[in-house]
Amino acid sequence: MSGLRCLGVLLCYNDGDLLEESISYLLEQHHDLIAWDHGSTDETPSILERFRPHCREIRRVPREFDFYQLYQAMSRHLIESYVTDYDWVSWPDQDEFLEGPARDRSYYEYVVEAHDAGIDWIRFRNFNYWCTDEDDPTVSETTRRVRHYALRPDCPPRIRSWRAKVTNVRRFNHNALDGRPSPRLFDLRHYPMRSPSQMRARVLHDRAGLRRGNLNFHYANMRHRLESLQIPADALHYDDGVSDLDPDPIFDWRSIYGRAPADSDLRSGQSRGS
């Protein structure tokens, strides 16, 4: 095993049904772990406490702390306290699992290769996984139960992994870093909607009121059309857990998320300020 020192970072809020898998995956990929819990009201605090012996840091952040300042606060904390101890940082959203550009090797092995090749940061393709009526509800593990997916090609850049020394103040991990980007896109598996009940809770409660301007507009869009958020399994690809992910964008995710108001204005010939 390489001696590359890797740090995983998680910001958590009410994704407790997935959290054990998220933590276990990063640990399996030879990452130490920092997790901040942004005032979760589900099982997240108890799961984090159970994993405390395996983590560098677990912190409870009050829900009143502005979500739109959370990434900046964590970034500064990493710069002040951790980047000199590590070679690499991996910072997925809590419902994402990072992979290499292919499945012939583990994510960690691809990170080691990128580091040794002089790569400074990596952008990921966003493969959205969605619950369907073909999911077996008796399977508790999300990554074994939710197998249908499609690439979302038009989302903001997902930059989730970088050399520790180039860490900067992150803006939802969309902004670039200094240095050399990977010429190859890596992949991530994104599990926003994992069961009908979790989907309702996410839209009606957990992400309600999150929109600020055109940021996170899609939760408000989905809130008013819950019944149309069901996706038939045959509209998506199937992940057998072995084959490389299929980048064919066979599903239009805008039919689920809708469009930002600015997009709608431009399409109708209206200005943003109208």
Image (cartoon, grey):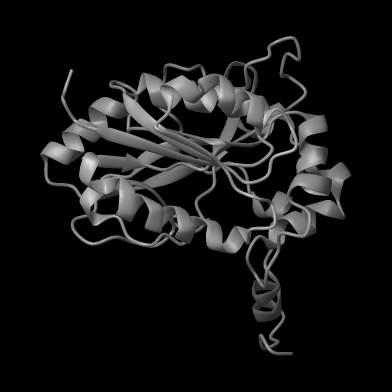
Q: Is residue 215 visible?
A: yes
**Between 150 and 206, which is closer to the camera in this rendering?**
206
**Between 213 and 23, which is closer to the camera in this rendering?**
23
Q: Is residue 173 left or right of residue 1?
A: right
**Between 84 and 161, which is closer to the camera in this rendering?**
84
**Residue drawn at x 73%, y 50% as measured from the top left:** 207
Q: Position of residue 64 (x, y in %)?
A: 69, 57
On-image quarter of the C terminus: bottom right
**Residue drawn at x 18%, y 47% as measured from the top left:** 119
**Between 83 and 127, which is closer to the camera in this rendering?**
83
Q: Is residue 129 left or right of residue 138?
A: left
For this orientation, the residue located farthest to the left is 117
Against 269, residue 155 (above or below) is: above
For this orientation, the residue located farthest to the top is 138
Q: Is residue 163 visible?
A: no
Q: Position of residue 80 (x, y in %)?
A: 32, 54
Q: Is residue 156 left or right of residue 112?
A: right
Quarter occupied by residue 137:
top right
Quarter occupied by residue 180:
bottom left
**Residue drawn at x 65%, y 70% as measured from the top left:** 214
Against 170, residue 113 (above or below) is: above
Q: Position of residue 123 (x, y in %)?
A: 35, 49
Against 6, residue 20 (above or below) is: above
Quarter occupied by residue 41:
top right
Q: Position of residue 68 (x, y in %)?
A: 58, 63
